Image (tube, rainbow, N blue to C red):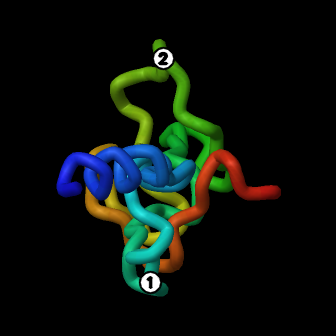
Amino acid sequence: MEEDSAATATATARVCRRCKAKYSPSGNTPQSCRFHPSFFVCRRHDDQKRYYELKDGDPPYAARFYDCCGAEDPDATGCATDFHVSYDDPE
């Protein structure tokens, strides 16, 4: 009987498209998903007024940060929380 409930939980587990975590729809709350609602961007020092989506090969002097919160670490914990959104859900 425990095997059946474990199999059911595994079958209903989904992957969040925002934070990439596995979750169960029954435990999805407004605080479940922690993510950045914007892109990790760079700003070259020679062009302070424009933002660019970060790409490989950007110069080392570029300022890099999340546009939403200013965090400079690409692995920084998300600054927003919401329900998980599955790849199976309509956009």
The mark nearer the N terminus, 2 or 1, is: 1
Distance from disc 2 to disc 1, alpha carbons, whole Å, reads 35 Å
> Nearest the camera: 47 or 25?
25
User: x and y percent of residue 69 in the render?
Assistant: 44, 71
The image shows residue 10, relative to residue 25, as above or below, that is above
Q: Dot 2, crowdedness within 10 Å: few (<14), some or many (≥20)? A: few
Outermost residue on the front side: it is 1
**Residue at 38% of width from left, 68% of height from top?**
34
**Residue at 64% of width from left, 40% of height from top?**
52
> Nearest the camera: 2 or 55?
2
Outermost residue on the left side: it is 2
Residue on which the image places disc 2: 56
Q: Circle 2 — which element?
A: loop
User: x and y percent of residue 37 in the render?
Assistant: 57, 65
Q: Dot 1, crowdedness within 10 Å: few (<14), some or many (≥20)? A: few
Q: Amino acid at mark 1?
A: Thr
Q: Quadrant of the C terminus?
A: bottom right
Which one is in front in this view, the residue at disc 2 or the one at disc 1?
A: 1
In which quadrant of the rendered view does residue 32 lie? bottom left
User: x and y percent of residue 81 in the render?
Assistant: 44, 78
Residue on which the image places disc 1: 29
